[in-house]
Image (tube, grey):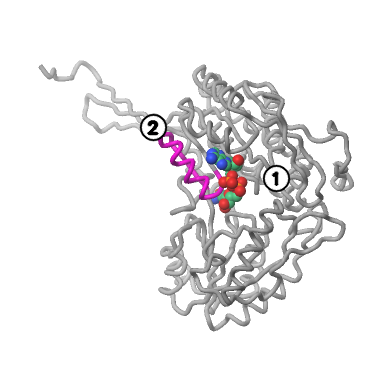
Amino acid sequence: MSQHDLTLIVGKDAPRDEINRVRHLIDGAWADGNGEVFERHSPAHGTPVSLISKGDANDASGAIAAARRAFERGVWSDLSGKERATLLLKVADLIDENRPRIARLEVLESGKPISQALGEIEGAADIWRYAASLARTLHGDSHNSLGRDMLGIVLKEPIGVVSIITPWNFPFLIASQKIPFALAAGCTCVVKPSELTPSTTAILGELLIEAGLPAGVVNIVNGFGDPVGSILTTDPRVDMVSFTGSTAVGKTIEKAAGDTLKKVSSELGGKNPQVLFADADLDSAIDAIVFGIYFNAGECCNSGSRIIVHEDILDEVISHVVSLSQKVPFGDPLDPKTKVGAIIHDGHQQKIDSYVREAVAAGAKIEIGGAPIQIDGLPGAFYGPTVVSGLTPDMPIASEEVFGPVLSVLTFRTMDEVISLVNDASYGLSAGVWSENIHTCLEFARRAQAGTVWTNTWMDGFPELPFGGVKESGQGRELGRYGLEEFLEVKTVQMRIGRTRANWI
Ligand code: NAD
């Protein structure tokens, strides 16, 4: 697809059959369910993008039944690691081939910029390749020192049927942080993408079929938390739930899944601090602060949404952040030059704005922004780059997930003080430290309560490195070897060698 094609959008009055049609994938076949549909409009352009089958209890139950059957029949779990890896590699190649098409739909449904979406899809293909490599390394342990007459074997087995529930902010990437690892482990899945961004997960379904995945191994049901998400987390035929989304829904899911004692792995929200010591390399740090807060319009679990700055450099840092913020290209997400696109929907834009209004009413100072902005010719919701200072740590804007391009600025004087500011939070997803002193960085990295600590960088990521949170940012890990372990169950086999067992009676 050429760049020109990327600027084509279905017009407001387009016939309905020109709109991208998103169906359920159940037992290897595309299904309309009960025929009910809902629409998704581009949050930037206001035009219709997708017409989506609205899943009901029958669709969810049928998809779970298909996944259960596929698992019990061993059509996937009985394959060798080599066979599973070969298929995952094929999917990675197909993702590469379909990259422009996937990226375009990702842009139109989520409002993220096209250059970023293309990068995310490329990164997703790389994750599928990494997961394929893990499929060939599955192994357990053996215990050969339990005495002459005993051998112990620890087997790793697929956990079974996994419900995979994903959010709207990185739809294809997050599906790719879960599905290939579940498949590498030998599990079968039922996937529910966000109702706001389901199209690219449906494309992934097409690619899985094209790659030759047996029917029923991956099923997709579109729709809402109620009833689809709720059934996926309570049905006794499901063994595990892998969820990414808000902490509030994560807590609901933990409770719902508790009745049948399913394993739950969850990637939830964050209020991630970047800490700047007085000896920081400010050029790099300021760029990373601006990237950390405006990337994906701040709608990012890893958003560096609060900076904690040493008092000696506060004025310098604020003035540099403000001046660099003015240079960030906000605009039409389909324009390749745009770095920040639209907010996911009007209601969310209002929520972002209300955090800012509340902070101002409580005495905070707006250094830049603090209001929605207009992008020429586009009706969608856009929020201006915003920096807010004069805060106390307990203000909602400084302690809650705003999920928008709004940076909170706090200050500190000593390491002990900044560690308590960082750790006195309900979240613990990621944290960052900027200092030219390795001892400062290491002390911070060891004392910060977070799943990931970046030192002199922000938001780098690699398929090899595990990702996840502590405290209310979730439990379990994705990516890396740990990302595979999540989907494995441990079985102990104890073997007696010869007739050496002493009778009890
Ligand atoms: P959300 O929690 O509103 O929705 C996530 C998914 O859960 C959607 O598919 C939704 O339909 C489904 N859902 C809603 N109610 C449900 C229920 N009762 N049972 C089962 N499923 C239900 O989150 P969102 O608004 O789509 O995404 C934004 C949130 O996700 C933010 O809080 C962000 O921090 C978090 N997030 C975390 C990570 C991470 O890796 N830690 C990554 C991306 C997003």
Give SS at disc 2: strand
Residue 60 at x, y = what percent?
58, 27
Return the mark for residue 122: 1
- Which residue, as the protein is rendered here, is positioned at the far left? 505
Return the mark for residue 490: 2
Residue 96 located left or right of residue 150: right
Residue 152 at x, y = what percent?
30, 28
Q: Is residue 178 visible?
A: no
- Above-or-below relation of 283 to 15: below
Q: Earlier in the sequence, mark 2 or mark 1?
A: 1
Residue 273 located left or right of residue 108: left
* Residue at left offset 53%, top offset 57%: 270
Residue 128 located left or right of residue 113: left
Q: Amino acid at mark 1?
A: Glu
Give, as a single range, the part of the protein colored magenta. 244-267
Q: Is residue 426 visible?
A: yes
Label 1 CA crowd tier, 10 Å (few <14, some 14–19, many 20+): some
Quarter of the image that includes the C terminus: top left
Give SS at disc 1: helix
Instruction: Answer whether labels 2 and 1 touch (C-beta < 8 Å).
Output: no
Quarter of the image that includes the N terminus: top right
Residue 195 at x, y = what percent?
66, 40
Residue 376 at x, y = what percent?
86, 60
